[in-house]
Amino acid sequence: MQKGGFNFDLYQRNVELIEKNNYKVPKTTKTGTTIVGVVFSDGVVLGADTRATSGPIVADPNCEKIHRISDYIWCAGAGTAADTENTTGMISLQLELLSLSTGRSPRVRTALTLLKNFLFRYHGYISAALVLGGVDFTGPHLHMIHPHGSTSTLPYISMGSGSLAAMAVLETGYNSKMGEEDAKSLVHQAILSGILNDLGSGGNVDLCVIKHKSMEFFRNIDTTNSKRKFRKKLPYMFKSGSTKILEKEIKEKMEKMEIVNEKENEIEELEEL
Amino acid sequence: MAGKNCVAIAGDTRFGVRNQTVALDSNRIFKINNRTLFGMTGLNTDILTLRESFKFQMNLYNLEEEREISPKTFAHNVAQTLYSKRFGPYFITPIIAGLEGEDYTPFLCATDLIGAMEFPKSFVVAGTGEESLMGVCETFYKENMEPDELFEVISQCLLAAVDRDALSGWGSVVHVLTKDGITTKRLRTRKD
């Protein structure tokens, strides 16, 4: 079985395939994205759009970009989808083990350090740009992490291809004395601005509100972009038998065989004698 | 494509090296267990390698867990195997289709070449004709189709898309998976 860590076995072969044979490499799913975080009086609000693209095609119109690191520490990710998923998953694992071995609830700062050290080791080859937010016993925290491993701590953050559109909304609307409803509404508007103005972002709006010992996840809080208004009511009906078949094979579901031990009876007979 | 308590996978059977056709009967859709079907497109050598690799892992799973793997767990297994080769990936695009749980709820999963999963409720597409496939599936897909209708819809989608893609065709297979078993049908496509 394979050991932990990345496996570079196929790297040489792939380089030759691409350079010498002009192989058309399948596209990775990217998350284009608008992700936003805002600190308010009691906690943190994280927001994200839900579009995952594969080149110019929308691979997943409703993916989840806000990942759980710990119960009250969540992370929104932009960049290559596989990288954000696996990076946040790995750090979530490490944080859980750490909190169990220290007997203390995890801190946002710890998650930040684990993430930045991990990403720096790979010098930007792991393309994950993250907005990390959470509330621990020291209060609410919000950080941004770039793929090369640099971090910033700010009261409001936007990242991804739609970050400019979102930042415009945040700069206009942010004030340091916001309450929960204002913060939610601001994040919502910022994500919506990204969805409408940036081609790499789209779909629905996801929000995550984290306060002290409480977390509310609003999945698809805004779906106005996903409802196709003029959809044909009666879809095309294919009549049964319209496709010509060459061969047909039906395999019934194979039940597991039960093996009955027949030797037990023989032993009983010997004892009687 | 998912229907009502059933799923179907369809694929063509051409194996070629760029514009030259090498074989007409290459099967890229494999049965993992009674509830899971697994299809791959891309570099043929990686398809063959991964077929053996997953067969091995599933045999081990069956021996250790003494039960069959659920489609969702298998999908995560595929994603992990692909991501372990993040820098130097397998050049494949896999699709997992299955029936999950006691209610036989349809389960679909597609990943990219490094294991980023997506779980749509309607249909997943992969291959050289994936853009045509996406268009035609989006048009013809309906919710809650019975197995017969699901077969018709997925066949017509595949045939339409395959006709518009020079690198696909030369025969096709459709597997429809329901709680009673798998029905496999071969279709006639254009031979060009």
Image: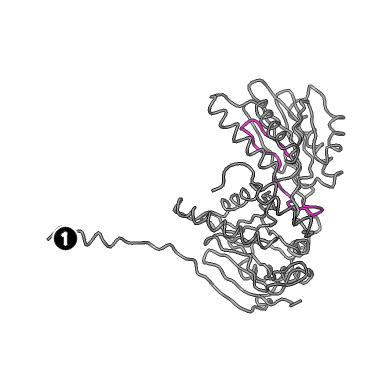
**Magenta range:** A54-77
Q: Residue furthest top?
A: A138
Residue A195 screen position, x and y as percent? 82, 44
Residue B16 screen position, x and y as percent? 72, 69
B6 over A72 or under it: above or below? below
For this rendering, which residue is in front, B158 or A2? A2
Disc 1 secondary structure class:
helix
On whether residue B16 falls in the magenta region, the answer is: no
- In the picture of the structure, the residue carrying the numbered disc 1 is A270
Subunit of label 1: A
Image quadrant containing the C terminus of chain B: bottom right
Residue B59 screen position, x and y as percent? 49, 57
Q: The disc labelled 1 sits on which kind of residue? A: Leu
| Horizontal arrangement in the rendering, residue A76 relative to residue A7 (left or right) | right
- Residue at the location (28% across, 63% down)? A262
- Residue at the location (72% across, 44% down)? A220
For this rendering, which residue is in front, A270 or B17? B17
Callout 1: 10 Å neighbours few (<14), some, many (20+)?
A: few
| Horizontal arrangement in the rendering, residue A239 relative to residue B54 (left or right) | right
